[in-house]
Amino acid sequence: MNLKDFIRSIPDYPKKGILFRDITTLIKDEKAFAETINQIVQRSKNYKIDKIAAIESRGFVFASAVAYLLNKPFILLRKKNKLPADVHSIDFELEYGTATIEVHKDSFKKNDKVLIIDDLIATGGTAEAAAKLIETSGATVVAFIFVINLYDLGGCKNLIDKNYLVENLIEFPGH
């Protein structure tokens, strides 16, 4: 099964010049969704991990299923002011401004080995911020697994240049 066949491309969304890669067409097909989860699970088994983390919000769709199948704790990396207890937070740059992500301070223990799963990587700014946030907690990011890599936007290369292990299931150009 070619997972690329299940990704809808929407031109000029959310603004002119962007070709949006839509995962909703993949997750609404039970066989494609199952295949995606199975591929992530297989790749995850290449790493010794204690916990799985995902970036809000589409990463939650994939990571929660993988965490369940691997019997690992699932940690939410959320947008600012979405978590009720004490948090670590990090601000980072986006192409169109700044953003903040947070995690509960009690989510990670020192030396926890963490796998980060997300739906898509573009420039890598959010992924890099997620890694720094986890490292602030004393844990180690073992690897990233993305469903989609927009290869010409440089996000994977950015993470690899910072010595992170990175995998993706499918690739598209970002433009």
Image: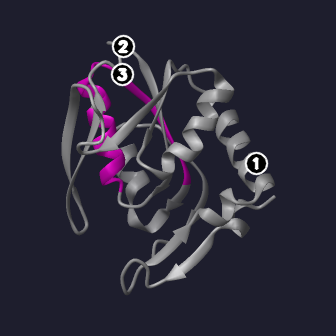
The residues tagged by marks 1 and 3 sit, at their Cα atoms, a distance apart of 29 Å
Label 3: which secondary element: loop
Name the residue nearer the viewer: 19 or 160.
19
Q: Kindly identify which numbered label has been placed on residue 111.
A: 2
What is the crowding at mark 3: few (fewer than 14 residues within 10 Å), some, or many (at least 20)?
A: some
51 relative position to 153: left or right: right
Which tag, 1 or 3, sits closer to the chain's start? 1
Name the residue nearer the viewer: 85 or 151.
85
Q: Kindly identify which numbered label has been placed on residue 107.
A: 3
Residue at the spot 37% in from the left edge and 87% down from the top edge: 16
112 relative position to 30: left or right: left
145 relative position to 124: left or right: right
Q: Nearer the viewer, mark 3 or mark 2?
A: 3
Label 2: which secondary element: loop
The residues tagged by marks 1 and 2 sit, at their Cα atoms, a distance apart of 31 Å
Q: Nearer the viewer, mark 1 or mark 2?
A: 1
Residue at the spot 51% in from the left edge and 58% down from the top edge: 149
Magenta region: 124-147
Quarter holding the N terminus? Answer: bottom right
Q: Is residue 123 above or below residue 162?
A: below
What is the crowding at mark 2: few (fewer than 14 residues within 10 Å), some, or many (at least 20)?
A: few
In the orientation shown, which residue stands out farthest toward the front?
A: 84
Residue at the spot 43% in from the left edge and 79% down from the top edge: 13
The residues tagged by marks 3 and 2 sit, at their Cα atoms, a distance apart of 12 Å
Amino acid carrying mark 3 in the image: Ser
Residue at the disc numbered 1: 35
Whole-percent x, y for residue 25 in the image: 66, 66
Whole-percent x, y for residue 104 in the image: 30, 27
Name the residue nearer the viewer: 45 or 32.
32
Whole-percent x, y for residue 99 in the image: 22, 54
